[in-house]
Amino acid sequence: MIDDPSVFLYIGVIALAAGFVHSAIGFGFGMVAVTLLPLFVEVRQSHVVISTASVPVLMMAAWAYRDGADWSALWRALVGAAVGMPLGLLAFEWVSPDWLIRGTGLAILLMVAISIRNRRRAKSEIPARAGSSWIAGALGGFLAGAVTIAGPPVAAYALSQPWEQSRFKAFLNQFLCAVASYKVAGLAVRGFIDQETLVQSAALAPMAIVGIQVGAMFSRRLSTRRFQTFVAIALVAVAIYFVVRGARE
C-alpha cells in the first residue's frame, strides 16, 4: 500500500487532467495518465491501475456520447481489437518498451498523414478509401495490451471519416470502453488486480469523471472544423513525443 497520503492528491490531479483531455478531444485518458502517473506510482503498477480505473471512466464517457455511433464501423473495430490485444500483451512481456513507444509514435504519424490525404482528396472530389476500422481496431487493441494506449490509431481513423464531433466521440468512447473492459478481464485472470490496485483506482476514477464533465463543456464551444484541427494537432504532438522520448527509464 502507499505510505505517503499525498500521493493520492497527485493521483487525483493527474486524473482530473486526464479526464479533461479525454473529454475535450474524445480520447487521451490513457496517454495522459500513463505519462504522469509513473512519476508517483511504480511503472508496472501504474499501468494496471490506469487500466482498472479506466473502465468506470470510459463507461461514463460512452454513456455521455451514446447517441450517433457508427455501429458498422464499431463492430469491425472491436473484432480487430479482440485479435490485436492478445498480441499486445505478448509484446508487453517480450518486446523492449522503448521500441513499442517509438513504434506507436510512428504508427500515429502515418495514420494522421493518411487521414489528411483522404480529406484533401475528398475536397477535390477524387475518390479516396476511407480507411479500415478493422485495422485501426486491431492496432488499438495491440497498443492497449502493450502500452495501455488504445485511442490514437482509432482516433486517426475516425478523423478520416466525415463525422460530426458527437459521432466521432460516440464511436471512439464506445470502442475504448469495450477494449478497457476486455483488458481488465485479462488482467484479473492473470492475477494483476489486487487490493492496492483497487484502492488507487478508486482515487483515480472519480476525479477523472469530474475532468470529463469539465472537458465536455469546453468541447461544446468548438466547431466541427476546429475540433478536427485540435484532434489532429494533439495526435501529432503525442506521436512526436513518443518517437523522441521513447520509454521512460
Image (cartoon, rainbow, N blue to C red):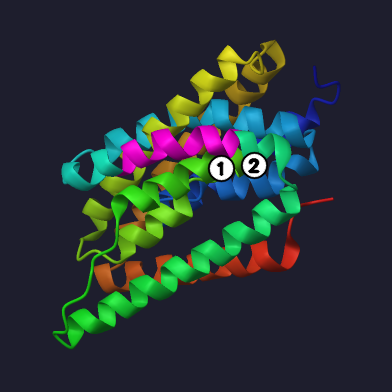
How far apart, in angstroms, are the residues tagged by discs 1 and 2?
5 Å
* Residue 8 colored in magenta in the image: no
Q: Name the side, left or right, on which 97 lies relative to 154.
A: right
Where residue 240 sits: x, y (%)?
62, 70
Q: Is residue 139 visible?
A: yes
In the picture, measured across the screen, residue 214 lies left or right of residue 9, that is left
Residue 86 is inside the magenta segment? yes
Q: What residue is shown with label 1?
A: 16
| Amino acid at dot 1 | Leu
The residue under label 2 is: 13
Decide: is 222 above or below 142.
below
Q: Residues within 10 Å of mark 2 (few under 14, many from 20)?
A: some
> What secondary structure do most residues of the magenta stretch adopt?
helix
Q: Relative to the observer, which residue lies in front, 35 or 23?
A: 35
Q: Residue 238 appears at what percent x and percent y?
A: 58, 63
* Count of numbered marks: 2
The reply, left or right, for residue 78 in relation to residue 41 is: left
**Range shown magenta:** 77-89
Tell me what residue is drawn at x 71 percent, y 44 percent.
Answer: 95
Q: Residue furthest bottom?
A: 124
Please state the horizontal and vertical placement of residue 161, each as a whole percent of the image. Answer: 24, 64
Which amino acid lies under the numbered mark 2 shown in the image of this protein?
A: Val
Callouts 1 and 2 close, C-beta under 8 Å: yes
The residue nearer to you, when weighing 49 against 214, is 49
Q: On the rendered image, what quadrant is the N terminus found in?
A: top right
Q: What percent of the width, then of the height, locates residue 195? A: 68, 11
At 26% from the left and 42% from the top, the residue drawn is 76
